[in-house]
Amino acid sequence: MTQTHAKTDAATAMIDGLVRAARSAQTALGSSSFATRQKALHEAAKIIRARTNDILASNQKDLAAAAQSGLTEAFIDRLTLTESRIEEMAVGLETIAAQPDPIGAELARWQRPNGLDITRQSTPLGVIGVIYESRPNVTVDAAGLCVLAGNAVILRGGSDSQHSASLLAEAMVEGLQAAGLPGAAVQIVNTTDRAAVGAMLAAVGGIDVIIPRGGKSLVERVQRDARVPVFAHLEGICHLYIDKDADPDKAKAITLNAKMRRTGICGAAETLLVHQQVAGDMLPAIAAELQQAGCVLRGDSAARRLVPDMQIAEDDDWRTEYLDAILSVRVVDSIDMAITHIATYGSGHTESIITEADDAAEIFLQRVDSAIVMRNASTQFADGGEFGMGAEIGIATGRLHARGPVGAAQLTSFKYVVRGDGQIRS
């Protein structure tokens, strides 16, 4: 047996063991009371707060290794935990717990002429595999959402966040146990061997859905190799369109926030489209603020005539998720051209129009076919927490089952409950 085959067999055996434990735990979790699942999340939040110093110390180990590896500032920002970010995780769990019970909800009900009473009722998906990279907070967000929706979860974090993610997963397990629920409902894959990812993707009948949370190469691999269903978005190529009827102050503030608040998140704006009628007045001022904040601008010829120190935008720039302080800029002659550009180069994630004109806003909101469309708001609001979901596992850009922020309600399926009184079919 080759070393590669031995690693694959070992990874498969390990994932099989996690899956068996997860399926057993999910049976108990999925039939537990809403109050019990809420208690588990509140207990986990307490534990996370109590262990803030330990979590920060573990995160420092991850950060030291990342710095030694020469990773980018944007990557290190995604990896970094602070006291405020740890508190945000705890608050996120409490906010998730405050959501309505996603299990057992009556989605529809009707009666047939023969007297049958039919209900469509929400149910847990089952066992969910979450494969992610540098963000330690995904550990808590994913586990919290899965627990509330009655799903067991198998977490496979990236090697860069292994110390932080393992400690956070322990807190979630202890929260479950404190509420009398099986700790195996939340498990983390304690190996950085990539063979474990392959074993998860091949776990047909064991894992019900895979959710990748990371960069393009990870998501591409999952979508290419998975033999189980996948919720995913490939990229967050998000657009801002400044319409001819935009308010200049809103345009400036929204653009700066959408690009520079956090450049490494999937909701960060990557392309700015500006209507030619206002480009001369607005673009130089907006560009100056962006550049002062450290943003590199890459523009088309019309944009560079207005801001000569912009770099030249190549065709690939319109297709690039920078996840960095870089912004592509294009001047367009109409809202139709802006919508066409988004349809051609966008990834279906999040787009925003800045305008005071109701008719233009409605055209944009109805015709742009992305998971999230906005008016006069920063694309950085593309986040389950900001949508009132407490948190989300990711932004799904597909068109089946879930789209947009994937919160607890999106981690359910449904069944039909049919109640009769002796009916037989003729």
Image (spheres, grey):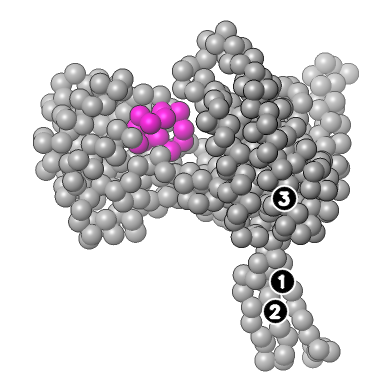
Is residue 329 visible to us here?
Answer: yes
User: Crowdedness of circle 1 by 10 Å Cα count: few (<14), some, many (20+)?
Assistant: some
Please tell me which residue lies in front, 109 or 298. Answer: 109
Q: CA distance from mark 2 to mark 3?
A: 32 Å
Q: Is residue 224 left or right of residue 267?
A: right
Spot occupied by residue 25 in the image (x, y as percentages of width and height): 83, 47
* Residue 416, numbered circle: 1
Is residue 223 visible to us here?
Answer: no
Given the image, on which type of amino acid does mark 2 rest?
Ile
Residue position for label 3 = 39
Q: Nearer the viewer, mark 2 or mark 3?
A: 3
Where residue 366 sits, quadrant-wise, is bottom left
Give the residue at the far top of this rendering. 68
Q: Nearer the viewer, mark 3 or mark 1?
A: 3
Q: Is residue 68 magenta?
A: no
User: Crowdedness of circle 3 by 10 Å Cα count: few (<14), some, many (20+)?
Assistant: many
Residue position for label 2 = 118
Q: Residue at x 81, y 34 (%)?
A: 15
